[in-house]
Amino acid sequence: VDKFAATAMMEKMRAETTANTGKVLGSYTVATADDFTYVDPVDGSVSKKQGLRFLMSDGSRIIFRLSGTAGSGATVRMYIEQYELKKIDLDVTSALGELVKIALSVCDIKEFCGTETPTVIT
């Protein structure tokens, strides 16, 4: 996607982390929304802006990372994770459907980048 559009999308979410903390989105509550900073346990070096995290009260997570920004384009990586004891026989799309919809709504990727269809799903 366009690097500038993807960067603007990330900055919009970054600016809204405080407002999103405690927010109810569908059947989920955002326990914490933050901009992840990695501190190396060996040398103490700090790497800021490593991803925007939406940590739900039930342990589910939505994480956005931007990569490949050195050239003209960028890759938006969206990670959706949910711990589930009951719906383990569902396909991924059904099991994570609500979290995916929430992720798409908080990032506004269609507005910023013109698409909401992934090129790779793993």
Image (cartoon, grey):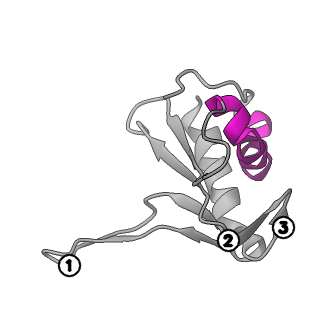
Q: Residue at x 48, y 29 (%)?
A: 122
CA distance for labels 1 and 3: 35 Å
- Classed neighbour count for the residue bearing mark 2: other residues with Cα under 10 Å, few (<14), some (14–19), many (≥20): some
Look at the numbered disc 1 and give the secondary structure of its residue. Answer: loop
Residue designated by label 3: 24
Mark in the foreground, 2 or 1? 2
Q: In front: mark 2 or mark 3?
A: 2
Please provide the residue range marked out in magenta.
91-112
Q: Which residue is pictured at 58% across the width and 28% down the height?
A: 1
- Counting from the top left corner in percent of width and height, residue 108 is at 77, 44
Q: Main secondary structure of the magenta part?
A: helix
Vertical side of 106 occupied by 33: above or below: below
Are circles 2 and 1 on residues that touch, CB within 8 Å? no
Give the percent coordinates (x, y) of residue 5. 65, 39
Q: CA distance from mark 2 to mark 3?
A: 10 Å
Q: Which residue is mark 2?
A: 57
Q: How many marks?
A: 3
Q: Residue at x 73, y 33 (%)?
A: 94
Residue on which disc 1 sits: 44
**Residue 16 against residue 78 in the figure, above or below:** below
Q: Residues within 10 Å of mark 1 (few under 14, many from 20)?
A: few
x%, y% of residue 36? 47, 67
